[in-house]
Amino acid sequence: MKPYRPSNGTEGSYFTSHWCDVCAKDNFDEDVDDSGCPILLKTLMMEVDCKDYPEEWVCEDDGSKPKCTAFRHEEYRQQVEKALEVKRLDEAETEWEELCHSNMKGGQ
């Protein structure tokens, strides 16, 4: 494997539409979250031989089969968000129980 960089805009558009545009790491709502995935930006700013060029964009030695090793399908993002929501609910329930328990002790 070697670092991958599209040879032109058309190839780049094809690659990003297949990987970045459907990736959970870069598919975010700018009004809510502006963190996104820095890989795409770095690949646009850096030459492929730069030491800080993202190692996640790779292809076969002959240039075929480009891919992003950091890719996570949108379903992954949805699972993470659901898990975080459940965790927040669990934490809120625990806090509520602790508050009720401490109030019961204080009222005795």
Image: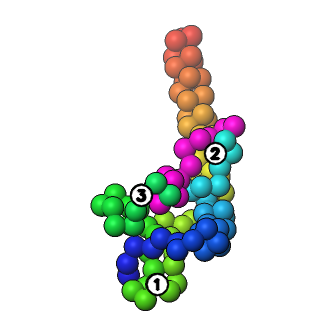
Counting residues from the start of the chain, the first of labels 3 and 1 encountered is: 3
Q: Looking at numbered disc 1 in the image, what kind of residue is underneath it?
A: Gly
Q: Looking at numbered disc 3 in the image, what kind of residue is underneath it?
A: Met
Q: Looking at numbered disc 2 in the image, what kind of residue is underneath it?
A: Glu
Residue of label 3: 46
Q: Are marks 2 and 1 in contact (CB under 8 Å)?
A: no
For the residue pair 90 and 81, the one nearer the viewer reads as 81
> Residue 84: image x %, image y %?
59, 47
Give the image quarter of residue 60. Answer: bottom left
> Residue 90: image x %, image y %?
59, 41
Is residue 38 magenta-colored? yes
> Residue 20: image x %, image y %?
60, 63
Magenta-tinted stretch: 31-43
Counting residues from the start of the chain, the first of labels 3 and 2 encountered is: 3
> Residue 47: image x %, image y %?
40, 62
Is residue 48 magenta-colored? no
Residue at 52%, 12% in the rendered image: 106
Residue of label 1: 63
Residue of label 2: 85
For the residue pair 89 and 9, the one nearer the viewer reads as 9
| Residue 39 higher or lower than 18, as above or below | above
